[in-house]
Image (cartoon, grey):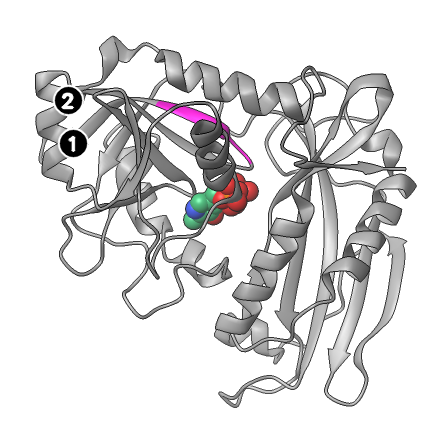
Amino acid sequence: MKQTNKSFGTVFTGHMFVMEWNAEQGWHNQRIQPYQDFVMNPACVNLHYGQEIFEGMKAFRAANNNIVLFRPVNHFRRMNRSAAIMCMPEINVEEVLQWLKKLIITDQQWVPHERGTALYIRPTMIASEVTINLKLASSYTFFIILSPVGSLFSQGFNPVSILVTENYTRASSGGVGQAKAAGNYAASMRAQKEAQRMGCVQVLWLDPVERTYVEEVGAMNIFFVIDNILVTPMLTDSILPGITRQSIIEWSKQNGIVVQERRIAIEEVIIGIENGSVQEVFGCGTAAVISPIGMLHYKGKEYEIGSKQVGPLTKKLFSMLTDIQYGATRDEQHWLELIE
Ligand code: PLP
Ligand code: COI
């Protein structure tokens, strides 16, 4: 077995998938090639105007040494949604999924075995036309790289402290926050730096218009358990529609847990933490799976949630997702796609 990352996303497998697009040929020159640097003209559009989208999904070692993908079609469909928002060409989901499977089979010795590890998959599309004129690019490159990973945060599955930022927002109303566009992540760094300066791990983002309603946490969606109800912000054009979020909602509804997707004011959360009605808070996403939140830092005060212990529903949902991913329980939802 090959090496797993010491630090998330710094080790890559031996091969990559690449293809190119232009209006005459559509997607063409599909190939699996040794992992290698790109030779890029310094006037390439993506380097100047950030026309770039990406995805993040995982493959796991399940029972009998099988390798499975978690909801890959949902990820590639979301990529097409991001492409539409960013005026980039759509991919053929079925065809790209077949190439991804071939790529993973080629590098199968890189899929780690230990529970808690995975092969992180990073499909990416960049505008590749050579011009510094500000216009819609006429050529694009799509590629997939693979990285064996452990947990995203050094804290593992332990509650973290979060800064509720009033100074910055992640995405604008009418902007591209619902797309997995590279620029959204570049724009989040300044708030993240402030959070770390305050001793917090991530930022809780409020809505960009009123700066009142909770949207996301870091690069994750957010859930609350309020009076035994699982509550999450309803989707807006500044929230990324997470596939982990969707999976948690679907499973919870099927298993008798009341779920609400609605607007959640930060004041409601703070009052609820103080009076005990906010019982649990957690972030969720592909890389982190579920990240329990033990403290909110808001307007200079610290609000401790559930005595900084991981709550019962947070634990249950983490086990549910990881048991399915590692084949410890039956995949009744049909979320897994076997690679053969
Ligand atoms: N929100 C943002 C901004 C993200 O980058 C991600 C990660 O992909 C998520 C939420 C969670 O999405 P998913 O569960 O599909 O990984
Ligand atoms: C993911 O959860 O896959 C993410 O996108 C986080 C990533 C930016 C590290």
**Looking at the image, is 167 positioned above or below residue 280?**
below
**Looking at the picture, which amino acid does disc 1 mark?**
Val
Choose between 31 and 264: the one closer to the eye.
264
Check if residue 240 falls in the magenta segment. Answer: no
Circle on res. 273: 2
Left or right of 35: which side holds 106?
right
For the residues labelled 2 and 1, the Cα–Cα distance comes to: 6 Å
- Per the image, label 2 sits on a secondary structure element best described as helix
Asked if one can make out residue 298 in the rendered structure from this viewpoint, the answer is no
From which residue to which does the magenta span run?
Answer: 287-292
Choose between 228 and 173: the one closer to the eye.
228
Circle on res. 269: 1
Please rate how many residues cluster around mark 2, counting C-alpha atoms within 10 Å: few if below 14, some from 14 to 19, many from 20: many
**Ligand 1 contact, mark 1 (Cβ < 8 Å):** no
Check if residue 289 falls in the magenta segment. Answer: yes
Asked if one can make out residue 144 in the rendered structure from this viewpoint, the answer is yes
Q: Residue at x 14, y 16 (%)?
A: 276
